[in-house]
Amino acid sequence: MQIWNRNRQVVYRSDAPRGARLTDAGGPSDELIAALSGTTESEVLSADHPPTSERDVRKLLRRHGDLMEVYVPIKNHGHTVGAFEVYLQNAATEAAIAQDTNRLYLVVLLGLSVLYAVVFRIVAAASRRLRDHAAELRRHAERSEHESLHDPLTGLPNRMLLRDRAHQAIVRGRRTGEETALLLIDLDSFKEINDTLGHHSGDVLLREVGIRLTRVLRESDTVARLGGDEFGILLPDVGGEEGAVTVARAVHRALQHPFPVQGLMLDVEGSIGIALLPAHAESFDELMQRADIAMYAAKGRRTGYEVYVPDATDGDRSRLKLASELRDAVARGEVVLHYQPKCEMRSGRVTGAEALMRWYHPTHGAIAPDRFIPLAERSGLIRSLTMFAIESAIAECRRWIDDGVDLAVSVNLSTRDLIDVQLPDDIARLLGERNVPANRLELEITESVIMADPLRARGVVSRLRDMGVNVAIDDFGSGYSSLGYLKRLPVNELKIDKSFVLGMTDDEGDGVIVQSTIDLAHNLGLRVVAEGVETEEVWERLRSMGCDIAQGYLISRAMAGSEFRRWLDSSGRSGSAAA
């Protein structure tokens, strides 16, 4: 060991004799200079390459092997006043370093192991969560896809999935020549059951119907709920009309067995319409229309099921073209309403007007309603025409109210309209949009329309009457309805069929029928309207019979809205025969 002063002179050496003069044998090293500056420095001296200038050091190297030369600054009050020069055996130092290094490696290894275990658990948990999330997303996507294609109540395919499978059957049929049938089913008494026992019972019944329909079909067939109490059955490769009818019979028999609901055995029958591809249609929409027409034919005839039968009109290219043009006639402004006044017989005062539809074709001119209305019913367009008529009539009534004219307007309904449970809601919306009181609107329905589905018709009529809308039975006497049933209908008027009114002067039997109808209506608390009043003689006779209101050419023909207003002004709103 040696001690150096600030002047870089050796002032003490451990191996020097006491009292010996000490001098610096060589110039200061870089390590010494750094130590005198306040920094601890060290250097390893190798026995294999001893320094040539320091003889004492070479002796130590030969004796002890490799040495570590260490310079440690000596400080006094923060100032460096010298330096220690110490020689240590490098083997011990290396051993200590090796031991510390191994200990460090061990600590690092253990730390890495712990870190790996922690990170592995974190990654594993994250991966598991990601897998679970991905699986949940897949399940959600599958569930969303299933819900978009299936009815939530019954679990059956919905209209969208039925359409898709029908398209597949159409494409396959064009390639293979196989025939596909569509059966459209409407439950005849569901509305009454739903209203009487409640919606929960109705839902139970619909689910049971879906199960029963599925049991009588093949796995390749598709039974779908289209909405409400309407079901559709797609039969690919059905084997023609005979095969479709066989399935329809099986379905009809299955529905004839009572359904157990809330401890009750409910009798539910269905009306089934049958249409085939390619015999009756070339697309799914056409197939639905044809099956819908056949279904209402089955409902009207009460036969249980009917196959769509193209009549002569469907085979006539000109009539088919006319039906196609009717589809856009309203949008083109070709369909308008004319108004025929109705007069109170005692005073001659105009009390209302019946809205009658007219089609002014750009090529064929005026087309009579008895020509295009049947086309609309067969092609499925009658619903849109009816809503156009109701909306236009309500708008015209609003104009009358704004002009201070207190008149009611009446519109005719078809079979398809009357069994549409959405109709009252649509009418309520239209009346609200125009702010027209409900009692200003009257809906006319024929006996045949009522008896096509009397239970559902009664439900729709009741809802309309509860809203305040007036309802009249049109062409009374020309149908085959039950008076016992009619007396329970919440109607306001009976309109005597014009065939009896026109024949009153020549056939006394017609006069008796008219008088009996007037008496019956009054006994039921109903007003009576006579159609087809064309002469003074008929007018006077009807008035003597007690008829309330008259309508016919004696008063006026049907007129466009603006012409009707001018007629009202010029006639002083009097519709008497003299006027």
Image: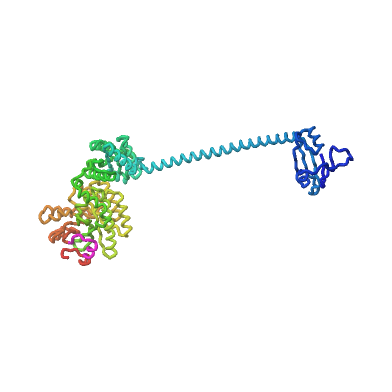
Residue at the extreme right: 19
Identify the image quadrant of the N terminus: top right
Q: Is residue 346 left or right of residue 173?
A: left
State the residue at coordinates (38%, 41%). 146
Name the foreground residue: 36 vs 53. Answer: 53
Q: Confirm whether residue 455 shows in the render.
A: yes
- x, y (%) of residue 288? 28, 44
- Report x, y in % for residue 425: 32, 52
Please say if 408 is above or below 252: below
In percent of width and height, residue 364 lies at: 19, 55
Residue farthest to the left? Answer: 506
Range of the magenta residues?
555-567
- Residue 564's spot in the image, x, y percent? 22, 63
Splitting the image into 4 quarters, where does residue 15 fall?
top right
Q: Outermost residue toward the top? A: 63
Q: What is the quadrant of the C terminus in the image?
A: bottom left
Is residue 557 covered in magenta? yes
The image's colour scheme reads rainbow
In the image, residue 328 sits, relative to residue 96, either above or below, namely below
